[in-house]
């Protein structure tokens, strides 16, 4: 099946800004996507949640844009926008009718150049309350809500930049000051720490001129501070178990493993393995635990890729009422163990490849998604052409690759098991949580 | 700090012409309608079979039978068992889906264009000849019961359930759970599912929509042999009228007690509108200004000014018959009463004063400008065309959308608000810690207060 190639240019301004132009006239729309090389991994101790709180402040106005005007201007242009923060990065993006491309570029440049002009205590206090409500909504008031935070904390030691969740803690959010925001901005929000991707209906010469006009005069920051050494062994060195009593109706068992870093070919093999294990109704875990043995209500297994040291491979099974959780856990482990011993079948591998191919076709359909991928590969690997080569990487994964990476990570000494059990009915006062460790969007 | 070069705002270029993609309509020999939309350069093709018979005519004692039948439809057919069917579709890189809503049931698949033929064969097999094996139906029924338990533990699902059962009368299907509840689901057996599926096999109610890069693909040649064999049943029976009378005739407040909750889930509203109304476009602009845009009155007040919430929204759920109008927010427990007061004040203000020219322009420009973005890929185009069929809307509805929005005036918006927002019979449904919020809410004197402390899960 031929996959369309994404044609693009990758250039750099004298101030260090990298930008990617990928014209595609199919629809009268254009996407702008800015990745900054800063995420929750760059947060100082006692300042967790800061990168994400800062992302909210980025929508509060800048030198030539008043509070709430950023989003109002884009929506009035018929555009959509958001920003998200994750462990390795923060991104901001707009999709709009193509004749409004300059509006998006100007807005992004204005906040990159002049955010601090508009920064004040009121805006910070307001967005701090919004973020605290986001934390309550997404995690604290949700059944099972804190599982991903617990997993991160168990999989990475306290001093590791991946130990704490992107949303941060209430105490640290309270402690953030205007001066902290200003320092963070001066340190990380600069052209030499950003990638701008433009995808869609535009003339490259015009877009290049606009990028130069709006971003060219912005001063670079001093070199971005280096992170500590983030490498960790690909094993925890022992099993970690935690039982959480929560206001949930069904027991759910969450599993986590340290996995190879994003960019390591072994992670691709693990993703193919995850598809075979739990990707849809034809997968091994679904077949056995949900369909045949009927001991689980649902199952999942997936990979969260990070570039610093190790990624997380995680999964869960929701235990059906009247079933012994130990039985579900044992069956789940048996399936993981089987992957480490026997090669997957040619048919399983073929189906996983076909599904990955369709998924990759789907992921390249919208200009918005293409722009995000180009920015991601440029920011994390300085290699945006990975957008064209990754699929081949997945299709080249062999049964032995899957077995080999499984054997490396699916062992008891590299395992976190968190079991959520229902609180007894008379203890329903305990605070109770979504099912995926998601990025933190701001709007 | 640099930045002087940014003092001048960019001016807009010339918009490129845009029309909703034209589609062709044809009929198979038995009357099944086929809509195709060619979208050059879009190799992932989307195909959908829409059936104009949703869950509204279910017997109350069989509530949820449509949703369960849709779920069970992929559990094996006359030719394939469940595993064989899923494996066959995965080999094509395709996933089969089925769902039932209030207005319609549907089955669908997305697949790279060269494999459309074999994928349509599987879609037809699943849609037309499901086997409904008893043991799989039993498993799905148990799963649904567990799902209800989980929905009641999730504040967002639970408050939605409480809201719809408050604003609709007990004899309205819209007040029930689409997927059925703990009373009805255990009784949904194979004969009930077969009967529901049988009602779907009616060529007069069926529309097939296929969209994507269809160059060199004979869509009719593919679907005719697969779907033309469904016998006509002699003209579709009209669906019975849906009871959608309001159950609330004055302002009321109902607090569902969730001890220890750190936020209160707030739903405010009443029975709203059906999709086929003459002032649809004015209603769209009005609700964008009230609670649709990021810069909507509700979001600006509750989020950007007060910091009470991560987001506040409002809108009409437009169905064949009047669906709910609701305003929604999750607010910090201690500010529940002031948040509800602000929310009601904004709804009242929509009725009492005109929107400004700036608000009107921003909302219209957004709805007009974002329209092409919504339809960039085949999936949404196909869904929208199916929606025309199941919503009983004219063929040019989507092509007319932008000019109609453009024509909406300040007076139209005001009139839509006056006619369709009913502050005098609004229900405020709160899910939160009654011990901490009830006194404040009562003091705010919003309406008759009732506290529900014993919410039987799933009843």
Image (spheres, coloured by chain):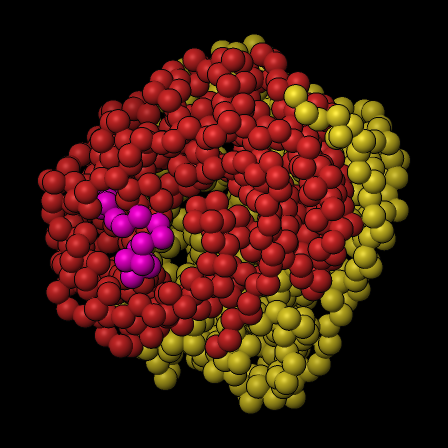
Tell me where residue B119 appears, x and y as whole percent. Answer: 48, 78
Q: Is residue A222 visible?
A: yes
Along the viewing direction, whichever of B400 and B435 lies nearer the viewer: B400
Quarter residue A124 falls in = top right
Q: Quadrant of the C terminus of chain A?
A: top right
Name which residue lies at 62% across and 20% down: A116
Name which residue lies at 79% across and 60% down: B18
A296 on left or right of B258: left
Q: Is residue B32 above or below residue B451?
A: below
Along the viewing direction, whichever of A96 and A372 lies nearer the viewer: A372
Along the viewing direction, whichever of B163 and A191 lies nearer the viewer: A191
Q: Is residue B210 above or below residue B426?
A: below
Magenta stretch: residue A422 in it? no
Name which residue lies at 78% across and 28% down: B7
Name which residue lies at 15% across and 61% down: A340
Tell me where residue B446 appears, x and y as whole percent. Answer: 61, 18
Magenta residues, start to end: A252-271
A30 on left or right of B192: right
The chain in yellow: B
A337 on left or right of B133: left
């Amino acid at each position: 099946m031929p996959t369309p190639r994404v044609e693009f240019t990758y250039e750099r301004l004298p101030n260090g800004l990298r930008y990617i132009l990928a014209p595609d006239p199919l629809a009268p729309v254009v996407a702008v996507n800015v990745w900054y090389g800063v995420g929750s991994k760059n947060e100082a101790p006692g300042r967790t949640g800061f990168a994400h709180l800062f992302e909210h402040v980025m929508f509060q106005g800048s030198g030539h844009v008043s509070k709430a005007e950023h989003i109002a201007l884009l929506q009035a242009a018929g555009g959509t926008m958001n920003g998200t923060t994750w462990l390795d990065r923060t991104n901001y993006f707009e999709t709009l009718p193509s004749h409004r491309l300059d509006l998006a570029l100007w807005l992004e440049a204005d906040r990159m150049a002049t955010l601090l002009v508009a920064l004040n205590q009121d805006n910070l206090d307001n967005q701090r309350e919004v973020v605290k409500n986001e934390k309550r909504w997404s995690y604290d008031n949700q059944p099972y809500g804190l599982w991903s935070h617990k997993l991160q904390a168990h999989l990475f030691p306290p001093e590791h930049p991946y130990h704490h969740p992107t949303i941060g803690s209430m105490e640290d959010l309270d402690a953030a000051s205007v001066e902290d925001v200003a320092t963070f901005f001066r340190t990380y929000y600069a052209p030499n720490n950003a990638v701008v991707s433009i995808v869609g209906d535009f003339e490259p010469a015009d877009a290049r001129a606009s990028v130069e006009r709006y971003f060219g005069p912005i001063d670079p920051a001093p070199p971005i501070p280096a992170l500590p050494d983030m490498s960790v062994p690909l094993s925890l060195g022992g099993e970690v178990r935690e039982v959480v009593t929560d206001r949930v109706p069904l027991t759910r068992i969450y599993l986590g493993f340290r996995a190879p870093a994003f960019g390591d070919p072994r992670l691709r093999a693990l993703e193919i393995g995850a598809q075979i294990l739990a990707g849809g109704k034809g997968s091994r875990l679904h077949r056995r635990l949900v369909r045949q043995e009927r001991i689980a209500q649902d199952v999942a297994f997936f990979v969260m890729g990070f570039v610093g040291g190790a990624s997380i491979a995680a999964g869960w099974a929701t235990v059906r009422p009247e079933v012994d959780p130990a039985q579900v856990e044992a069956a789940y482990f048996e399936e993981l163990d089987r992957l480490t011993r026997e090669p997957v079948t040619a048919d399983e591998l073929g189906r996983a490849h076909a599904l990955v191919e369709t998924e990759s076709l789907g992921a390249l359909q919208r200009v918005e998604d293409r722009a995000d991928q180009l920015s991601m590969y440029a920011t994390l690997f300085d290699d945006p052409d990975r957008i064209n080569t990754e699929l081949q990487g997945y299709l080249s994964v062999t049964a032995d690759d899957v077995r080999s990476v499984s054997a490396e990570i699916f062992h008891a000494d590299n395992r976190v098991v968190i079991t959520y059990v229902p609180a007894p009915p008379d203890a329903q006062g305990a605070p109770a949580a979504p099912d995926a460790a998601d990025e933190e969007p701001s709007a | 700090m640099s930045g002087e070069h940014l003092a001048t705002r960019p001016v807009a270029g010339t918009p490129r012409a845009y029309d909703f993609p034209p589609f062709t309509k044809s009929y198979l020999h038995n009357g099944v309608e086929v809509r195709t939309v060619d979208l050059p350069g879009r190799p992932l093709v989307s195909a959908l079979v829409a059936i104009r018979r949703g869950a509204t005519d279910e017997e109350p004692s069989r509530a949820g039978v449509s949703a369960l039948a849709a779920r069970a439809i992929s559990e094996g057919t006359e030719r394939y068992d469940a595993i064989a069917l899923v494996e066959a579709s995965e080999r094509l890189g395709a996933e089969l889906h089925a769902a039932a809503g209030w207005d319609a049931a549907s089955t669908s698949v997305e697949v790279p264009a060269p494999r459309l033929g074999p994928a349509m064969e599987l879609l037809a097999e699943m849609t037309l000849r499901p086997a409904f094996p008893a043991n799989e139906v039993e498993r799905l029924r148990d799963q649904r019961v567990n799902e209800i338990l989980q929905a009641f533990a999730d504040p967002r699902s639970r408050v939605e359930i409480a809201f719809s059962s408050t604003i609709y009368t007990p004899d309205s299907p819209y007040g029930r759970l689409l997927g059925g509840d703990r009373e009805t689901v255990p009784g949904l057996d194979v004969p009930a599912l077969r009967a529901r599926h049988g009602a779907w096999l009616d060529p007069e109610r069926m529309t097939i929509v296929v969209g994507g890069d269809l160059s060199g693909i004979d869509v009719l040649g593919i679907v005719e042999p697969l779907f033309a064999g469904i016998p006509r049943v002699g003209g579709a029976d009209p669906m019975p009228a849906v009871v959608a009378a309001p159950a609330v005739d004055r302002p009321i407040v109902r607090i569902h007690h969730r001890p220890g909750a750190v936020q209160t889930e707030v739903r405010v509203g009443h029975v709203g509108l059906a999709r086929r109304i003459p002032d649809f476009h004015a209603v769209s602009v009005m609700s964008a200004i009230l609670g649709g845009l990021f810069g909507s009155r509700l979001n600006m007040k509750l989020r950007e000014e007060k910091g009470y919430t991560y987001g506040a929204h409002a809108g009409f759920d437009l169905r064949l018959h009047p669906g709910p109008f609701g305003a929604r927010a999750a607010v910090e427990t201690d500010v529940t009463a002031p948040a509800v007061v602000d929310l009601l004040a904004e709804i009242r203000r929509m009725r009492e004063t005109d929107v400004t020219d700036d608000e009107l322009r921003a909302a219209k420009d957004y709805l007009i400008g974002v329209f092409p973005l919504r339809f960039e890929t085949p999936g949404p185009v196909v869904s929208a065309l199916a929606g025309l069929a199941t919503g009983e809307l004219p063929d040019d509805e989507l092509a007319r959308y932008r000019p109609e929005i453009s024509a909406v005036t300040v007076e139209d918006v005001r009139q839509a608000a006056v006619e369709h927002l009913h502050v005098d019979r609004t229900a405020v449904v709160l899910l939160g810690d009654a011990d901490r919020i009830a006194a404040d809410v009562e003091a705010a004197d919003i309406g008759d207060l009732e506290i529900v402390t014993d919410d039987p899960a799933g009843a």
